[in-house]
Image (spheres, helix red, strand yellow):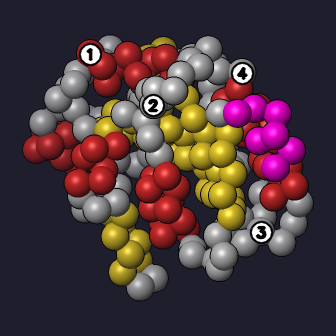
Amino acid sequence: MSAPKVSILTTIYNREAFLEDCIRSVQKSHFQDYEHILVDDGSTDASIEIAQRLAEQDERIQLHRNEKNLGDYPNRNKAASLATGKYIKYLDADDMLGRWMLDIMVDAMETHPECALGLIDYADDTFHTAKSLAPQDAFDAHYSGRMNIFNRSPLGAILRKDVFDSLGGFQVRGWWETSKCGM
């Protein structure tokens, strides 16, 4: 079996109210070349039961349980370490994936293979044309107010796994968590 194009990463901590809708939104996506990695971080609600039930019904869903609570960004790193796809796509357990979102994101990344990070941007319900920005250009566009590049949730981002791995994932520094790539 070959590796999927995208590894969708969902970290879970007490999200029973949202989790099934989150997972089902991925299953209903037009894009189907994915694995969905779920990593539970010690939930005390019914999240694990929901995840187990859905994983038993779909071989693309992999469920992992942490022995102890790692916290948000260490758990995100754990999920990424399990990924086998060319791209990683974080999908928080209380978010839902749009039907065409992965198609658009993967197409943009494949069209611009020099890019390590893809961000979906929309205004007035229309998507902008894919464009490639050098790091300094992205910085200038964001901080000049021309484009809202960096104020995004994980829902709007896709990353090349090889670059994420080469940067060492998210760096944890006490109460403040960040990454070397500015996320």
Which of the 4 quarters of the picture holds residue 32? top right
Q: Which stretch is magenta?
A: 52-59
Which element carries disc 1, helix, strand or loop? helix
Q: Does any portion of residue 171 appear in the rendered image?
A: yes
Q: Left or right of 137: which side holds 24? A: right
Query: What residue is shown at x 61% (from left), y 39% (from top)?
Result: 36
Where is residue 19 drawn, in percent x and y?
78, 47
Which of the 4 quarters of the picture holds residue 34? top right
Compute the Cα span from label 3 to label 2: 29 Å
Please give the residue where the numbered disc 3 appears in the rendered image.
Answer: 43
The local crowd at label 2, few if under 14, some if 14 to 19, many if 20 or more residues have their Cα within 10 Å, is few
Q: Choose the circle earlier in sequence order: 3 or 2.
A: 2
Query: What residue is shown at x 79% (from left), y 49% (from top)?
Result: 51
Please give the residue where the numbered disc 1 appears in the rendered image.
Answer: 111
Query: What residue is shown at x 17% (from left), y 29% (from top)?
Result: 114
Please give the residue where the numbered disc 4 appears in the rendered image.
Answer: 28
